[in-house]
């Protein structure tokens, strides 16, 4: 199989629900520029040398470090500028109440409320949301320790904005500290693929069997797949054919889950700096010092750079080119470089 080559992404001339179709060409262009992130950082370093990101609300000194590295400050400023530019485009909903009913319902169902510490957390599956839910349960006194060895119930003892009246939602949106965490989009998809199709029987039966039926020709009389042998390219083909608004939350684009244009977040953390950014949030809400973000579980097998590169380099380039527009808003809004799949990068 010829190795995939991904050098330029062309936007598909299709309309998307939710008013974002007009943004795709400009966002795609931005994503291509960000792919040369080293050059962009050099340019921004000169432009933004004097800019300082504001400290979080709460203590100025964060746990374990008093000042962010300059490159991280630049990255945050790039992200903030991109969000402002994208969210300022005509036709983009700039409040929760301006969203269509479906997207608004999805957003409110993904925002967890903690009234004691006056915070709102938009959870994103496969971006450490289980550990954040543990932290929120401890903050609320529903769990004794973040290290409690209990199977996570993702709804019990948690309050969501969707549980509240419109007036209660408005009050919290106006007065509470709001945050979310993001992750490199394809890395997040690979993590979901490995977990759901490699470990969870319910997903193998509900999604895996259907994916195999759709995308893998079977000779007459062949034994039906159990759904546990879905390949990564087959999974990506399934995502390509799915309506974004009807996707399972584990692979729905982050911007559709958390709507960063309709809801202004006080802080957007990243999976790549999970512990540092989590500490920053805990300081911002003035959480007790004994509450620390949990260590990664010993059984957890993280997606490494090498693992991601292997899977992407064994995925047809044409498939990736077709799929990326579905996730280009996540790449662009959160300042992630597009994947480098040149022949040299794939070791060919």
Image: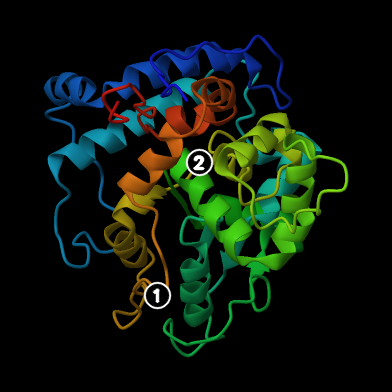
Q: Earlier in the sequence, mark 2 or mark 1?
A: 2
Residue that appears at 29% across and 79% down? 289
Question: In the structure shown, which secondary structural element does the residue marked by tag 1 occupy?
Answer: loop
Residue that appears at 15% across and 61% down? 65
99 vs 347, left or right, is right
Question: In the structure shown, which secondary structural element does the residue marked by tag 2 occupy?
Answer: loop
Q: Quadrant of residue 30?
A: top left
71 vs 87, left or right, is left
Nearest the viewer among 243 and 165 is: 243
Look at the image and tell me whether residue 301 can be seen: yes
Image: 118 above or below 15: below
Image: 133 above or below 262: below
Q: CA distance from mark 2 to mark 1?
A: 32 Å
Nearest the viewer among 238 and 112 is: 238
Structure colour scheme: rainbow
Residue corresponding to mark 1: 297
The percent position of residue 51, horizontal first and vertical second, equals: 18, 32
337 vs 138, left or right, is left
Mark 2: give few (<14), some (14-19) or many (20+) Cα within 10 Å. Answer: some
The percent position of residue 301, horizontal first and vertical second, equals: 40, 64
Residue corresponding to mark 2: 264
């Amino acid at each position: 199989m010829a190795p995939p080559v991904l050098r330029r992404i062309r936007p598909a001339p299709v309309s998307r629900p939710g008013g974002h179709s007009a943004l795709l060409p400009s966002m795609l262009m931005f994503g291509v520029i960000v792919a040369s992130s080293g050059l962009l950082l050099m340019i921004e370093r000169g432009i933004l040398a004097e800019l300082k990101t504001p400290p979080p609300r709460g203590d100025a000194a964060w746990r374990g470090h008093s000042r962010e590295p300059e490159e991280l400050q630049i990255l945050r400023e790039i992200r903030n500028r991109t969000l402002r530019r994208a969210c300022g485009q005509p036709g983009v909903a700039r409040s929760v109440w301006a969203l269509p009913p479906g997207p608004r319902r999805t957003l409110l169902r993904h925002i967890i409320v903690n009234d004691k510490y006056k915070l709102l957390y938009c959870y994103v599956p496969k971006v450490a949301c289980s550990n954040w839910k543990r932290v929120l349960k401890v903050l609320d006194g529903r769990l004794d320790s973040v290290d409690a060895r209990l199977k996570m119930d993702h709804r019990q003892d948690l309050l969501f904005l969707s549980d509240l009246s419109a007036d209660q939602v408005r009050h919290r949106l106006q007065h509470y500290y709001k945050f979310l965490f993001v992750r490199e989009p394809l890395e997040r998809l690979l993590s979901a693929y490995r977990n759901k199709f490699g470990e969870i029987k319910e997903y193998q039966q509900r999604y895996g069997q259907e994916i195999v039926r759709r995308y893998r020709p079977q000779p007459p009389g062949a034994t039906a797949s159990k759904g546990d042998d879905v390949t990564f390219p087959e999974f990506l083909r399934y995502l390509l054919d799915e309506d974004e608004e009807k996707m399972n939350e584990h692979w729905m684009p982050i911007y559709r889950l958390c709507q960063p244009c309709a809801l202004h977040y006080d802080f957007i953390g990243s999976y790549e700096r999970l512990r540092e950014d989590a500490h920053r949030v805990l300081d911002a809400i003035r959480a007790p010092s004994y509450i620390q973000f949990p260590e990664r579980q010993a059984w957890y097998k993280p997606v490494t750079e090498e693992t991601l590169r292997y899977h992407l380099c064994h995925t047809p380039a044409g498939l990736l080119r077709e799929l990326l527009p579905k996730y280009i808003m996540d790449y662009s809004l959160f300042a992630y470089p597009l994947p480098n799949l040149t022949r040299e990068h794939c070791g060919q």
